[in-house]
Image: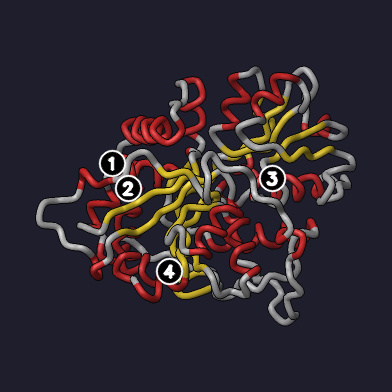
Amino acid sequence: MPVNLPQSRIRRGIAALAALPLLTLAACGYGSDSDKSDTTKVAAGAKKIDGLDTVKIGYFGNLTHATALVGNQKGFFQKELGATQAKYAIFNAGPSEIEALNSGSIDIGWIGPSPAINGYTKSDGTDLKIIGGSASGGVKLVVDPKKIKSLADVKGKKIATPQLGNTQDVAFLNWIADQGWKVDAQSGKGDVTVVRTDNKITPDAFKAGSIDGAWVPEPTASKLVAEGGKVLLDESTLWPDKKFVITNIIVSQKFLKEHPKVVEAVLKGSVETNKWINANPDAAKASANKQLAIDSGKALPADVLDPAWSSIEFTDDPLASTLNTEAQHAVKAGLLTDPLLKNIYDLTILNKVLKADGQSPVDAAGLGSS
């Protein structure tokens, strides 16, 4: 059963996360444009949905965002959008994607749970909705086996997370607290030194010995293993049924209200993409890697791609109760104050799409419309 966060107290704000700096993106503006949009896949005679010329979709260049990678690369989104053109923007940081959503630079985005929670609560629940799930798992604690041989050995070591207050940072801080150790969430100093490091830099820092390990998503975790690291803990083992949300789909509330048919088309594309991924895992893995190469200029080698891919589950279910738990972890770490998440989800359109496809509906765990 989901555990609801306190709703009776007035939310006093989340200044800690609000003050987080944005990470530098790969290009100017909010996100780098993908070199390839799906214009070549618009069917002859296709019509625009609601007369809309384009829909702007954001995602990260991570395998945990493979629904977006594959949906883009294979044209699943464009197929459902008809002559409304899918445009893509690639991000490196959740706060930057939230800012882009709020400004209208993107309409729909794939994003981790912590930035979604942060964006929703900072706007008093007015800027975004979570409208679907995308992925579970794909997060690991990878360490230098010469320095750390057991979980107890993590104490006193330097462990990287991607960013203060991001999804993996919150999870690691919670795990540290569960060990009975003390760490100041803001500074990262304490019984463990938490080093906030961009995922692009983490493998080099690990190789240089400036960190002893990292709690990171894929493919960064497998990159560390390729550099001689060892998986000490898979985060999925800490969750019931080994499932927890790592990627959600969000939409601007303004866009959802004005263009629900376009949102439905994107969700149809997402459901079809996940169905194809799960039915064709090897082809889907190759497709995701191909899009990563287009977006970043470099594909992943097999020794990174294969183990990373096998640790991620692709699902339309947003796993709402686990988002609620992750929010509680942020509260416990002192990074959130009583977030009111009651209406963060609107799964109405997703469940319409799932029903039409003969699938079972998914649940908002008491946190929205379903």
Q: Disc 2 or 1, which lies upstream in sequence?
A: 1
Viewport quadrant of the C terminus: bottom left
User: Who is closer to the viewer here, 264 or 323?
Assistant: 264
Look at label 1 and name its amino acid. Lys
Amino acid type at circle 4 is: Leu
Q: How far apart are marks 4 and 2 (CA)?
A: 18 Å
Q: Position of residue 28 (x, y in %)?
A: 53, 45
Residue assigned mark 2? 273
Whole-Å distance between the Cαs marked 3 and 1?
31 Å
Whether residue 358 is visible to the viewer of this picture, yes or no, is no
Specify whether 213 is left or right of 271: right
Measure the C-alpha gap from mark 3 to mark 2: 29 Å
Mark 1 Cα within 10 Å, few/some/many (few <14, many 20+)? some
Upstream in sequence: badge 1 or badge 4: 1
Find disc 4 in the rendering and name its residue.
347
Report the Cα–Cα distance between label 4 and label 3.
29 Å
Instruction: Return the mark for residue 163.
Output: 3
Q: Is residue 302 above or below residue 49?
A: above
- Above or below: residue 314 compared with residue 361: above
Residue positioned 58% across, 32% down in the render: 220
For the residues labelled 4 and 2, say whether their Cβ atoms are less than 8 Å apart: no
Query: Can you tell which of label 4 and label 3 is closer to the viewer?
Result: 3
Q: Name the residue under label 1.
A: 74
Q: CB atoms at circles 1 and 4 under 8 Å apart?
A: no
Type of amino acid at the residue the image marks with label 3: Gln
Sooner in the amino-acid sequence: mark 4 or mark 3: 3
C-alpha separation, residue under disc 1 versus residue under disc 4: 25 Å
Label 4 neighbour load within 10 Å: few <14, some 14-19, many 20+: many
Task: Tell which circle, 4 or 2, labels the residue nearer the N-terminal end.
Answer: 2
